[in-house]
Image (cartoon, rainbow, N blue to C red):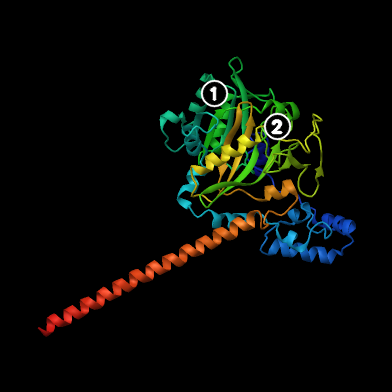
């Protein structure tokens, strides 16, 4: 067996899904379908796609087709221009979030979570954290595979959920839901009743997260109404909030709906769904399944048959107040994407991201997020505030320089007078 084949085999046998493979694009097939659906020429579609991929929007080819931007009868020119890709999303977030000194704090699940808990804002209880870097023992610091294994064998806080601390909610990998520990086999039992040897899992944590950290926290269960509709998987709602003019306002929301046996709610996981949520009412306005160019809009959950389209999520008003409370702790941060669970004990924040990928809104709604009433307005106001601050700082610097120059001239004049005397 070649070294490459051996590496591939090792990757297939890992306990956790550490890597997310690149999308397999069929651009020629997409062009053919787009031409057939619209009657447009292949050349005109290809030229338009090139503008969105190479221009300011920075889409991928897959996104251009997935969002069906080529459909002239679906979108006006202005509506098409409101679509953005991940790179454009990051640049916009950089402008809105200029309080860089606290961004890493908010993105750290452990530190920001402790602040939320201390402030009375519901957050899953942390039980242990693996890290090669030193941490306070009071956090349940585990520094090597042996300590991870001992924790899993001795703790009585099952069920547990494990995840990377530095992960991004929309694209994270490496998560696990653990039901219990079986002493007879020395295995942990996952949510789907499959077993994994403790030593194997602990060694994998040390191998893959030696340059980062890994958090074990309590497992949260969904609201009874959601569990009846979607199963016991915890599908979080991404609620993006903005801080402007001393107020915290919700911008948009999307619900990541789990398949009944899903370990996590990431949309790239097979069987999961995504819904556009009315930010004012909590009503599901659009539900889709499938990824990229090949997706379907649905009205019911494919496995349970529960009605989803038009359904109002439970505890919605409390959910909005929860994320507003959390954002108010760091109101200097302009925009935050919260992953919030509508849980069996009420709305509960799972994590926060200061650089939310706004393409999730476009996946959920089928509309461009860079519209005046959404991200564009926030971005333009943030850019104007930044320019005003620069202008103020330039005036201050000029005033200081002029004052220094006048003082220097006075010093020279005084020196000349002394020489004359």
Query: Which residue occupies the extreme left position in the image?
Result: 421
Q: Does residue 180 lie above or below 261 as drawn? A: above
Residue in view at x 59 percent, y 58 percent: 379
Mark number, residue 300: none
Query: Which residue occupies the extreme bottom position in the image?
Result: 420
Residue 224, image x, y percentages: 69, 25
Instruction: Give the camera-side residue of 325 and 25.
Output: 325
Q: Is residue 98 left or right of residue 398?
A: right
Residue 174 in view of the camera:
no
Residue in view at x 59 percent, y 41 percent: 338
Q: Secondary structure at mark 2?
A: loop
Instruction: Give the camera-side residue of 207 and 278.
Output: 278
Q: Secondary structure at mark 1?
A: helix
Residue hosting label 2: 262
Residue 201: image quadrant is top right
Residue in view at x 30 percent, y 75 percent: 405
Residue 394, image x, y percentages: 42, 68
Q: Does residue 293 lie above or below 139 as drawn? A: below
Residue 102, image x, y percentages: 47, 47
Residue 70 in view of the camera:
yes
Q: Whole-Å distance between the Cαs marked 2 and 1?
A: 22 Å
Disc number lying in front (2 or 1): 2
Query: Which residue occupies the extreme top position in the image?
Result: 184
Residue 7, image x, y percentages: 64, 41
Residue hosting label 1: 152
Q: Is residue 411 left or right of residue 68?
A: left
Disc 1 crowd rating (10 Å Cα; few below 14, some 14-19, many 20+) is: many
Residue 179: image quadrant is top right
Q: Does residue 47 lie above or below 31 as drawn? A: below
In this rendering, the count of numbered labels is: 2
Q: Is residue 398 left or right of residue 324?
A: left
Q: Quadrant of the N terminus?
A: top right
């Amino acid at each position: 067996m070649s070294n490459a084949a051996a590496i591939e085999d090792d990757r297939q046998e890992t306990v956790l899904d550490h890597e997310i493979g690149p999308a397999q694009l069929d651009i020629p097939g997409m062009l053919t379908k787009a031409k057939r659906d619209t009657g447009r020429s292949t050349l005109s579609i290809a030229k338009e796609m090139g503008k969105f991929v190479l221009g300011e929007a920075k889409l991928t080819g897959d996104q251009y087709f997935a969002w069906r931007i080529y459909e002239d009868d679906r979108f006006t020119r202005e509506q098409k221009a409101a679509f953005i890709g991940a790179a454009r999303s990051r640049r916009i977030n950089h402008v809105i979030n200029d309080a860089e000194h606290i961004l890493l704090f908010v993105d750290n699940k452990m530190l920001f979570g402790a602040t939320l808990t201390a402030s009375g804002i519901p957050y899953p209880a942390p039980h242990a954290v693996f890290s090669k870097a030193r941490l306070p023992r009071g956090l349940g610091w585990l520094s090597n595979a042996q300590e991870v294994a001992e924790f899993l064998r001795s703790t009585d806080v099952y069920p547990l959920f494990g995840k990377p601390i530095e992960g991004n909610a929309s694209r994270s990998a490496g998560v696990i839901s653990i039901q219990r520990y079986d002493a007879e086999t020395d295995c942990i039992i996952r949510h789907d009743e499959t077993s994994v040897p403790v030593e194997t899992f602990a060694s994998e944590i040390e191998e893959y997260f030696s340059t980062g950290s890994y958090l074990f926290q309590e497992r949260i269960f969904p609201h009874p109404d959601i569990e009846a509709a979607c199963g016991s998987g915890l599908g979080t709602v991404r609620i993006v909030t903005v801080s402007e003019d001393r107020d915290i306002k919700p911008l948009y929301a999307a619900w990541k709906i789990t398949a009944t046996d899903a370990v996590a709610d990431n949309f790239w996981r097979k069987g999961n769904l995504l819904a556009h949520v009315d930010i004012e009412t909590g009503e599901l306005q659009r539900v889709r399944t499938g990824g990229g160019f090949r997706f379907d809009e649905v009205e019911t959950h494919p496995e349970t048959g529960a009605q989803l389209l038009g359904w109002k999520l439970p505890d919605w008003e409390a959910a909005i107040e929860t994320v507003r409370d959390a954002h108010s702790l760091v109101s200097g941060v302009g925009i935050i994407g919260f992953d919030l669970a509508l849980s069996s004990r009420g709305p509960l924040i799972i994590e926060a991201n200061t650089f939310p990928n706004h393409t999730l809104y476009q996946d959920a709604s089928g509309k461009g997020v860079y519209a005046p009433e959404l991200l564009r307005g926030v971005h333009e106001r943030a850019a104007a505030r930044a320019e005003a601050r620069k202008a103020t700082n330039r005036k201050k610097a000029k005033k200081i320089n002029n004052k220094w120059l006048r003082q220097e001239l006075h010093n020279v004049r005084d020196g000349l007078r002394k020489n004359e005397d």
